[in-house]
Image (cartoon, rainbow, N blue to C red):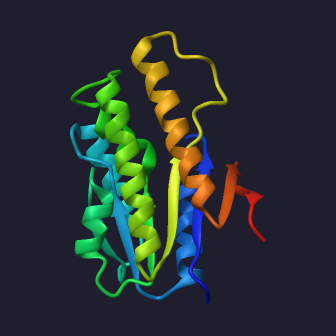
Amino acid sequence: MAKQIVLLLGGARSGKSYYAQQLAGELGRKVLFVATGEPLDEEMQARIAEHKKHRPQNWRTQEIPTRIGKGLRKKIGDADVVVIDCITLLISNLLRDEPATAEAEKRIATEIDELIDTMDRLDASFIIVSNEVGMGLVPDNKIGRVYRDLLGKANQLLAKRATEVYLMLACLPVQVKGK
């Protein structure tokens, strides 16, 4: 099967992660799951534990909260499919120290460019999960608006490079780019 880059977009609890796992099983046998979430509080620890329970036991997992491109080049091993879950938390991680600055915007652009370059160089298919946060209300605070805008830009760059893009609605994939 030819190399694919699939971007899954959707709201919270839209079925993105579930569908990513389903696709990964169809695309290859050696799956590397890249988690960007960090267990910084009890609620997030519980979410991470719940996600882990639903992943196949034979998948390798790497926790890479930032610098995913660099981390993947070091840790891909023999994986033929890489699931990145999720860009939403990656952007949040990058904004944690310096929210709403021009420097933060540059860091995010560099991060996404490095990820795209890495995907182009590696001989594996990629499934990327990200939230679509631009369809709701305009956030009432600056950091919320900056976050929404930067995640939107990251999603645009990834969608441009992706071979297929799906919008997840109630666990139903609606194809917006591809075959």
Image x and y of residue 179, in percent: 78, 71
Of 25 and 109, nearer the camera is: 109
User: Can the viewer see residue 171 in this picture?
Assistant: no
Instruction: Say left or right for 94 vs 4.
Output: left
Taking the spot 34% from the left edge, 58% from the top edge, the residue there is: 35
Image x and y of residue 175, in percent: 76, 59
Residue 25 quadrant: bottom right
Image x and y of residue 54, in percent: 43, 66
User: Can the viewer see residue 120 in this picture?
Assistant: yes
Above or below, 82 against 66 in this view is below
Above or below, 137 against 83 in this view is above
Taking the spot 67% from the left edge, 58% from the top edge, the residue there is: 165
Residue 4 quadrant: bottom right
Residue 101 quadrant: top left
Instruction: Say left or right for 37 vs 137.
Output: left
Find the residue positioned furthest to the top: 140
Image x and y of residue 9, in percent: 61, 49
Taking the spot 44% from the left edge, 43% from the top edge, the residue there is: 88
Taking the spot 31% from the left edge, 58% from the top edge, the residue there is: 68
